[in-house]
Image (tube, grey):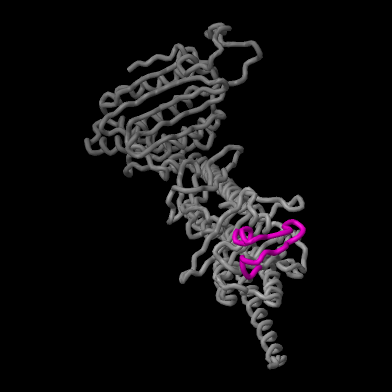
């Protein structure tokens, strides 16, 4: 009986097999281009291989950077996946390979096949260098490392399977991988099938490298998109700083490689901004926010879940760079916002100074024009009042004219002081003495209104060159303002002290206080919070003008319902080296510690 070989059928079968392998290779490469995470890629590719090969088990050994791992899937009616990092690993030719250094025959054979240390063309080694067997009951030779493999050795290699194939493939960056095919059927593989799988394994190696590149590209795109969106947010000038920082923390989680378990937090000057999904516990990556040479807070990305077993590190090296870039960006934003605020304040101060200069020029002109007619009105009214036998009604009217004219003349005088057109008479002045004189003028008024006066006047202050009448005007104007702020009584505290290069006068009340908006306007002429007829709106501007003309400044601290504090700061002329006031005690060589305010002014006393 003769066996008829149908060459046409064999050829068609071979062509179909080659086409099927080609289609599977394209499917794997196409899926790799999606740039999916490593575990998702391996899961899908192993399913493709299981479906195509009809094997009972698939395994992969690969290296990805510093990560060495194995991936296995078995089909016992339901797919079962196993992933595991490998450590410690064997070295082959001085290079580590994804094989456990446990001395076992299987791991040593894996390393030999991957490193091409087996002799092709033997009974169990294909011409392409793949190891394969179809049963564990036939001894084999696998030179040069494994001259003879008996049933026990073959059973160790095959495990619960009858047919196994270990197919090496190359990865980029001079690393190697291994594809394992396993079947419970004996003689499941043939030389031609092994040859096809070797081609498929090379395509798999290309796909693994491409997936890695695509995944890295997508991660870089996410990171750059995050930085771009942060920059776009920063460019929106109308966005408040609070909203800007909240927007940044919301943009961060999607930029990391595991966005589904990422959340972000930002701390700046002890203020905390958190993303909407922030959980607070987990593994975190943090970068400090530094500006003005100081640490002002930090930005933090937190993973709330566990680490993927197939990841060498939870945070990519590029993600360390990303969070550092975000921290630097936030530092620049804070510095820019502060610079803009400083500029806004300076511009407002310049506008304020310009308004004051304009009002001063206008006030000086108006004052000069009004002085002469006011003097005439006052003189004639006073003369008329001396006429004999004036009716009572006329006398009352003349009194009103005189009082109104004196009030108008006082306003003119304040305008001239404000515009600095009143002549000054400077002499050596003791600030505590001026403060005491001002209080003595107003003490009875304070008593009537239930205001308790506390004096903390330093004795033997350095004298300054100033106009005593103008400084007295400053004290009176500010004290009157403070008393008017305490209609139901309160406490008025006057303090004087000396620093190294200045004298300070504090006038503090427990009155109604002022809002920040009011504080900004109190030195503008004619601005007043009092009712019509109860204030000129010139008291504080005049005080401000006098202090400025003496080279000093006035600082104001106030809060609604908690009172106000006016601090007048006047410069002290520099004394020649070695000179000191006669009232000063000689320096104590033992006193090397930092002095408190009371130690600086031992003569300060409280009096009521």
Q: How far across and down, in percent of the image, does residue 26 sit?
A: 65, 77
Quadrant location, the N terminus = bottom right
Direction front: furthest residue? 1
| Residue at horizontal 68 percent and vertical 51 percent from the top | 90
The residue at the far left in this view is 392
250 to 371, vertically: above or below: below
Which quarter of the image is occupied by the C terminus? top left
Q: Is residue 53 left or right of residue 410?
A: right
For the question of whether residue 14 can be seen, the reply is yes
Residue located 35% across and 16% down the image: 607
554 sits left or right of 323 in the view: left
Q: Which residues are magenta?
A: 133-156
Q: Nearer the viewer, residue 172 or 58?
A: 58
Q: Name the image quarter holding residue 193.
A: bottom right
Instruction: Identify whether 268 is placed above or below 231.
Output: above
Q: Which one is nearer the viewer's eye here, 142 or 304?
A: 142
Task: Pick the residue in front: 276 or 212.
Answer: 212
Above or below, 442 relative to 560: above
Q: Is residue 64 magenta?
A: no
Q: Is residue 29 left or right of residue 477?
A: right
Percent across and percent down for residue 32 are: 62, 70
The image shows residue 91 at horizontal and vertical percentages of: 71, 51
Q: Position of residue 468 (x, y in %)?
A: 49, 22
Looking at the picture, tell me which residue is in the foreground, 385 or 33: 33
Numbered-mark total? 0
């Amino acid at each position: 009986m003769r066996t008829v070989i149908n060459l046409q059928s064999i050829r068609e079968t071979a062509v179909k097999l080659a086409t099927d392998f080609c289609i599977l290779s394209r499917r794997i490469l196409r899926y790799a281009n999606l740039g999916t995470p490593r575990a998702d890629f391996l899961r899908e590719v192993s399913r493709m291989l299981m479906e195509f090969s009809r094997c009972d088990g698939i395994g992969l050994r690969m290296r990805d950077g510093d990560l060495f791992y194995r991936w296995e899937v078995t089909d016992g009616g339901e797919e079962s996946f196993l992933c595991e990092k490998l450590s410690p690993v064997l070295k082959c030719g001085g290079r580590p390979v994804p094989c456990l250094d446990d001395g076992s025959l299987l791991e040593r054979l894996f390393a030999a096949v991957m490193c091409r240390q087996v002799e092709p063309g033997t009974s169990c080694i294909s011409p392409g260098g793949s190891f394969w067997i179809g049963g564990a009951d036939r001894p084999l030779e696998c030179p040069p490392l494994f001259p003879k493999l008996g049933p026990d050795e073959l059973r160790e290699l095959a495990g619960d399977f009858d047919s196994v194939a270990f197919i090496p493939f190359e990865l980029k960056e001079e690393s190697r991988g291994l594809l394992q095919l396993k079947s419970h059927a004996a003689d499941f593989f043939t030389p031609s099938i092994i040859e096809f799988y070797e081609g498929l394994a090379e395509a798999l190696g290309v796909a693994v490298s491409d997936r890695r590149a695509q995944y890295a590209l997508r991660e870089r795109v996410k990171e750059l998109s995050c930085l771009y969106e942060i920059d776009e947010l920063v460019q929106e000038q109308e966005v408040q700083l609070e909203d800007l920082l909240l927007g940044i923390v919301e943009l961060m989680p999607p930029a990391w490689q595991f966005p589904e378990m990422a959340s972000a937090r930002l701390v700046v000057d002890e203020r905390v901004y958190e993303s909407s999904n922030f959980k607070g516990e987990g593994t975190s990556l943090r970068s400090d926010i530094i500006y003005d040479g100081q640490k002002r807070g930090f930005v933090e990305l937190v993973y709330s879940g566990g680490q993927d077993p197939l990841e060498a590190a939870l945070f990519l090296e590029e993600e360390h760079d990303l969070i550092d870039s975000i921290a630097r960006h936030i530092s620049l934003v804070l510095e820019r916002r502060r610079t803009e605020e400083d500029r806004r304040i300076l511009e407002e101060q310049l506008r304020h100074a310009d308004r004051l200069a304009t009002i001063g020029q206008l006030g000086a002109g108006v004052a000069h024009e009004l002085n002469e007619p006011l003097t005439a009105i006052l003189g004639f009214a006073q003369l008329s009042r001396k006429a004999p036998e004036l009716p009572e009604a006329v006398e009352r009217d003349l009194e009103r004219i005189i009082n109104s004219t004196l009030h108008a003349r006082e306003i003119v005088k304040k305008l001239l002081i404000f515009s600095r057109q009143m002549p000054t008479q400077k002499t050596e002045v003791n600030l505590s003495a001026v403060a005491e004189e001002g209080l003595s003028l107003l003490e009875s008024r304070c008593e009537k209104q239930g205001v308790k006066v506390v004096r903390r006047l330093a004795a033997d202050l350095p004298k300054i060159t100033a106009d005593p009448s103008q400084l007295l005007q400053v004290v009176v104007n500010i004290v009157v303002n403070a008393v008017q702020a305490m209609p139901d009584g309160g406490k008025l505290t006057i303090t004087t002290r000396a620093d190294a290069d200045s004298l300070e006068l504090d006038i503090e009340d427990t009155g109604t206080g002022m809002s920040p908006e009011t504080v900004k306007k109190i030195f503008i002429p004619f601005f007043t919070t009092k009712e019509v007829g109860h204030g000129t709106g010139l008291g504080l501007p005049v005080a401000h003008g006098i202090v400025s003309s003496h080279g000093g400044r006035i600082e104001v601290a106030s809060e609604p319902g908690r009172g106000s504090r006016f601090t007048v700061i006047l410069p002290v002329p520099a004394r020649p080296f070695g000179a000191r006031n006669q009232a000063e005690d000689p320096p104590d060589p033992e006193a090397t510690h930092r002095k408190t305010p009371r130690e600086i002014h031992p003569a300060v006393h409280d009096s009521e």
